[in-house]
Image (cartoon, helix red, strand yellow):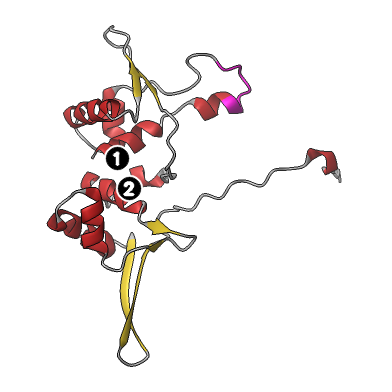
């Protein structure tokens, strides 16, 4: 659930809004200020679960929190630069067919899918993911099968050359997990035609 809370919190990050509006950066132009109830609503979790997760995320140095000590003033959340990050599609939070546990599992298993096709690096998916995440096989299996049934994960076995089976395991395109950098525009050669 901590991964889901982190993703929900990060979705409120205001840094890009300030850069797009060409405002000078100040101490409050980075990070975000959502209330606990707002984070809970975005993640689909209770406020108590969010508070507990935020404490764990802060203790693990995934976030830095500035508390203002006044009621009705939201905390300021900062995000240290992390080496291994990937982008979470915002549509994940709006997926009504997923439970909070399934959303959290989808975020956690995303790290095991690589390449443009988002193919899984493991053939024994569930046991390897469970081992790497430190979860029980049953926990991962339950969520994984549910994600396959709902079409978020593709897991199929095909017969290949009579007796050999080929297993294809990838994330579906139900959510857009691939974010390509926008190409830079060379304005020195930019021509505007008026008709």
Q: Residue at x 57, y 17 (%)?
A: 25
Taking the magenta stretch, the answer to whether it contains residue 21 is yes
How far apart are the two marked residues, 2 and 1, measured between alpha carbons?
Answer: 7 Å
Q: Residue at x 44, y 39 (%)?
A: 83
**What's drawn in magenta, residue-wise?**
19-25
Q: Quadrant of residue 1?
A: top left
Q: Are marks 2 and 1 in contact (CB under 8 Å)?
A: yes
Q: Quadrant of residue 59?
A: top left
Residue density around tag 2, few if under 14, some if 14–19, many if 20 or more, within 10 Å: some
Taking the magenta stretch, the answer to whether it contains residue 192 is no
**Left or right of 4: which side holds 140?**
left
Q: Main secondary structure of the magenta part?
A: loop
| Residue 3 image label | 1
Disc 1, SS? helix
| Residue 107 image label | 2
Q: Which residue is the extreme one toward the bottom?
A: 162
Above or below — where is 158 with respect to 82? below
Lower sequence index among marks 2 and 1: 1
Q: Residue at x 40, y 46 (%)?
A: 91
Q: Quadrant of residue 118?
A: bottom left
């Amino acid at each position: 659930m901590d991964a889901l809370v982190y993703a929900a919190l990060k979705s409120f990050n205001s840094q890009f809004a300030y850069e797009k509006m060409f405002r000078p950066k100040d101490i409050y132009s980075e990070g975000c200020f959502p209330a606990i109830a707002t984070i809970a609503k975005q993640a689909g979790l209770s406020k108590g679960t969010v508070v507990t997760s935020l404490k764990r995320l802060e203790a693990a140095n995934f976030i830095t929190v500035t508390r203002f000590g006044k009621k009705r003033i939201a905390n300021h959340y900062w995000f240290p630069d992390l080496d291994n990050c990937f982008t979470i599609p915002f549509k994940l939070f709006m997926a009504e067919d997923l439970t909070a546990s399934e959303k959290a599992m989808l975020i956690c298993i995303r790290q095991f899918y690589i390449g443009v096709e988002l193919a899984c690096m493991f053939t024994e998916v569930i046991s390897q993911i469970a081992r790497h995440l430190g979860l029980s096989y049953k926990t991962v299996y339950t969520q994984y099968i549910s994600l396959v049934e709902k079409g978020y994960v593709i897991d199929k076995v095909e017969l290949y050359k009579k007796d050999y089976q080929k297993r294809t395991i990838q994330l579906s395109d139900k959510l857009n997990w691939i974010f390509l950098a926008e190409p830079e525009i060379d304005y020195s050669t930019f021509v505007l035609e008026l008709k």
